[in-house]
């Protein structure tokens, strides 16, 4: 199973970005999927998750109401739509897949990780 994250970049505060995570080796509908982010001086932290059946979503409080996770089964891709971005959202964003949990928000619950994509929000 391989995950390829893309879509990061530089954006002004208040702007939007959409991250994509293309999955190969397994269909996305058989996995719970999530997004995490990390800055150099902190642990990797949970951002958002979507359940294996695609009907449930879960967000960290810091992004609730601003970020939306979704997936496209036909493209085998998961997305993170980010709006009203803040400088504190600046981080490397990672997508992840869990084969054993219906939905997951802990790093230990995820089995596969993408390579990360940099998001920088300027003030």
Image: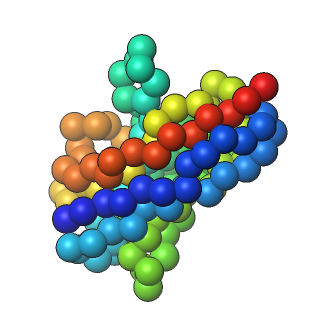
Q: Position of residue 100 (x, y in %)?
A: 18, 57
Residue toward you, 5 or 75: 5
Residue 51 in view in this figure: no
Q: Position of residue 99 (x, y in %)?
A: 20, 60
Residue toward you, 57 or 39: 39
Position of residue 118 relative to residue 80, above or below, is: above
Position of residue 90 relative to residue 18, above or below, is: above
The image's colouring method is rainbow
| Residue at the (46%, 24%) spot, across then down | 39
Residue 27 in view in this figure: yes
Q: Residue furthest front?
A: 10
Position of residue 26 relative to residue 38, above or below, is: below
| Residue at the (50%, 61%) spot, across then down | 20
Image check: 24 left or right of 34?
A: left
Residue toward you, 38 or 47: 38
Q: Residue furthest top?
A: 41
Specify the quadrant that holds the C terminus.
top right
Image check: 85 left or right of 49?
A: right
| Residue at the (51%, 40%) spot, across then down | 118
Residue toward you, 73 or 116: 116
Q: Position of residue 1 (x, y in %)?
A: 19, 65
Image check: 79 left or right of 41?
A: right
Position of residue 79 relative to residue 24, above or below, is: above
Q: Position of residue 40 (x, y in %)?
A: 41, 20
| Residue at the (56%, 49%) spot, across then down | 8
Quadrant of the rendered image containing residue 19: bottom right
């Amino acid at each position: 199973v391989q995950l390829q994250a893309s879509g990061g970049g530089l954006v002004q505060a208040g702007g939007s970005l959409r991250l994509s995570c293309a999955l190969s080796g397994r269909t996305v509908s058989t996995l719970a999927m999530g997004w995490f982010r990390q800055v150099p001086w902190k642990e990797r932290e949970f951002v958002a998750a979507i359940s294996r059946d695609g009907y449930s979503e879960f967000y960290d409080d810091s992004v609730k109401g601003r970020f939306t996770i979704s997936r496209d089964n036909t493209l085998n891709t998961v997305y993170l739509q980010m709006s009203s971005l803040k400088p504190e959202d600046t981080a490397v964003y990672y997508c992840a897949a869990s084969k054993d949990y219906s939905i997951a928000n802990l790093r230990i619950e995820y089995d596969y990780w993408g390579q990360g994509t940099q998001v920088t929000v300027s003030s």
